[in-house]
């Protein structure tokens, strides 16, 4: 299958089917006709024709609208196109619902807007190849030229745009194709797990989360496309990402480690990285999330029970826990000396406990230096856990390159 073929947009198509509502144990089915399309950012669009329902059913549909403070009511959507494509969702929901009818009418005309959190499209491909392939599509992803590497789950390929791309434009893929000796029974699960891990380390490298609105699985002439809604829309007001790594050096170096890491260790590292990647418009929040990420790392990778410097403490303070983990991982301390980490924690504590907000340039400088210190600590911990060897971008005192694990200036 060529890359051109996979990048073909999904053309708008008519579908017919049913909305299936489970209302306190009793099931209601409403016929629905709709046009299904996918926009440039990979979001599934469902344009529904008006639905005609018996008057006494209006409230069932209206009950699907969300209410403040309540969980969003979900329903099922099952539909098919004339050429046999099947679209299903267990997490469909309504964002609007308007009725119109006259007294005496048997049926009401209901105009609804349907969205799905996750939807699956199943179809057969013209491609007769029996190759099993899993593809994650990535918006706003730059990575050129593409590169390939072999893993136990298959051949991984990562590709992205060479130039700047439009907001939310789908520009990249992570792609894995099964090897002949792979067991087909659990292949998709293993491939999915590996691609999710790679997506997270790619997010870490570029300093901003990667979202996958579309996942495709090709297997024996069939394709299942899963659409995920959400992703970050219009994040231009967010603070810009701080990229730390050149993907071409980073990815081949960490793929074998990412692949073999056990689930428990991966889960802890993943949670720490996700905290570290929380998008924000505020420096204060960037400091809080970076320290939360660091806390997550120290509790999971070096759970210190007692420290000699604070014998009367029931639990060692965070600064001692961080110190313990840095020692355990034998991390170089240039520009992340103990007093700098301690100062950053103090700034965090002032923000959280003493309603502190920076008021002048000196405050701003202190806050930003704290952010950079904590991020540098976290970057070195993550690189160490990923057993990375190579150059990375450091921002303490201005952007520059350092070599890992020596942390010497390049
Ligand atoms: Zn201590």
Image: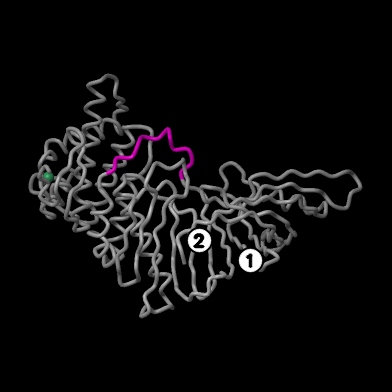
The image quadrant where one finds ligand 1 is top left
Residue drawn at x 25%, y 30% is: 367
In the displayed structure, does residue 190 sit left or right of residue 370? Answer: right
Question: How far, Cα to Cα, is label 2 from label 1?
Answer: 18 Å
Determine the secondary structure under disc 1.
loop
Q: Horizontal and vertical percent for residue 141?
A: 39, 48
* Magenta stretch, residue numbers: 232-243
> Measured along the vertical axis of the image, is residue 271 above or below residue 258?
above
User: Which residue is under mark 2?
Assistant: 5
Q: Secondary structure at mark 2?
A: helix
233 magenta-colored: yes
Count of residue discs:
2
Q: Which residue is mark 1?
A: 85
In terms of sequence position, does the residue under pointer 2 or pointer 1 come before the other?
2
Q: Which residue is painted at 75% across and 60% down in the image?
A: 31
Q: Residue furthest top?
A: 360
**Label at residue 151:** none
Q: Position of residue 348 (x, y in %)?
A: 26, 34
Residue nearest the observer in this picture, 79 or 61: 79
- Horizontal relation, residue 18 to residue 178: left or right: right
Please rate how many residues cluster around mark 2, counting C-alpha atoms within 10 Å: few if below 14, some from 14 to 19, many from 20: few
Position of residue 158 in the picture relative to residue 340 (left or right) = right
Please determine whether, in this image, residue 65 is positioned above or below residue 258: above
Q: Mainly helix, strand or loop, the magenta region?
A: loop
| Foreground of the two, 25 or 206 | 206
Toward which corner of the image does residue 102 lie, by quadrant?
top right
Point out residue 309 in the picture as x, y percentages from the top left corner: 8, 44
Q: Check whether the beta carbons of the residues at disc 2 and disc 1 lie within 8 A of each other.
A: no
Q: Out of 206 and 330, give the one closest to the viewer.
A: 206
The image shows residue 125, relative to residue 161, as above or below, that is below
Q: Position of residue 185 (x, y in %)?
A: 43, 78
């Amino acid at each position: 299958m060529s890359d051109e073929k996979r990048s073909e947009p999904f053309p708008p198509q008519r579908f017919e089917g049913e909305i299936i509502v489970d209302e306190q144990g009793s099931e209601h089915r409403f016929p629905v006709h709709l046009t299904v399309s996918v926009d440039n950012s990979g979001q599934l669009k469902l344009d529904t024709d008006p639905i005609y329902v018996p008057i006494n059913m209006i409230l069932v549909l209206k009950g699907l609208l969300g209410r403040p403070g309540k969980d969003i009511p979900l329903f099922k959507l099952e539909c098919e196109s004339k050429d046999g494509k099947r679209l299903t969702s267990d997490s469909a929901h309504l964002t609007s619902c308007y009725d119109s009818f006259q007294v005496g009418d048997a049926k009401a005309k209901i105009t609804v807007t349907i969205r799905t959190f996750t939807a699956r499209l199943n179809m057969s491909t013209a491609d007769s190849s029996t190759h099993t392939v899993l593809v994650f599509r990535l918006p706003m992803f730059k990575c050129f030229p593409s590169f390939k590497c072999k893993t136990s789950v298959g051949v991984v390929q990562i590709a992205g745009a060479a130039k700047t791309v439009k907001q939310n434009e789908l520009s990249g893929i992570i792609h894995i194709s099964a090897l002949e000796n792979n067991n087909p029974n659990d292949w998709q699960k293993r491939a999915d797990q590996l691609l999710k891990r790679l997506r997270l380390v790619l997010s870490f490298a570029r300093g901003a989360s990667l979202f996958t609105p579309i996942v495709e699985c090709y297997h024996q002439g069939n394709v299942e496309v899963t659409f995920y809604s959400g992703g970050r829309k219009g994040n231009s007001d967010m603070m810009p990402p701080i990229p730390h790594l050149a993907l071409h050096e980073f990815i081949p170096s960490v793929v074998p480690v990412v692949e073999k890491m056990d689930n428990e260790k991966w889960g802890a590292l993943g949670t720490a990285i996700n905290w570290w990647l929380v998008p924000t418009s505020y420096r204060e929040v960037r400091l809080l999330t970076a320290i939360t990420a660091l806390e997550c790392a120290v509790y999971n990778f070096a759970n210190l029970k007692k420290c000699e410097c604070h014998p009367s403490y029931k639990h060692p303070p965070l600064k001692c826990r961080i110190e313990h983990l840095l020692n355990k991982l034998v991390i170089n301390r240039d520009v992340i000396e103990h007093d700098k980490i301690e100062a950053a924690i103090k700034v965090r504590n002032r923000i959280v406990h003493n309603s502190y907000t920076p008021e002048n340039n000196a405050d701003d400088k202190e806050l930003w230096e704290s952010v950079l210190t904590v991020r540098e600590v976290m970057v070195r911990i993550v690189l160490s856990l990923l057993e990375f060897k190579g150059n990375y971008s450091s921002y303490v005192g201005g952007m520059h390159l350092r070599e890992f694990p020596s942390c010497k200036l390049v």
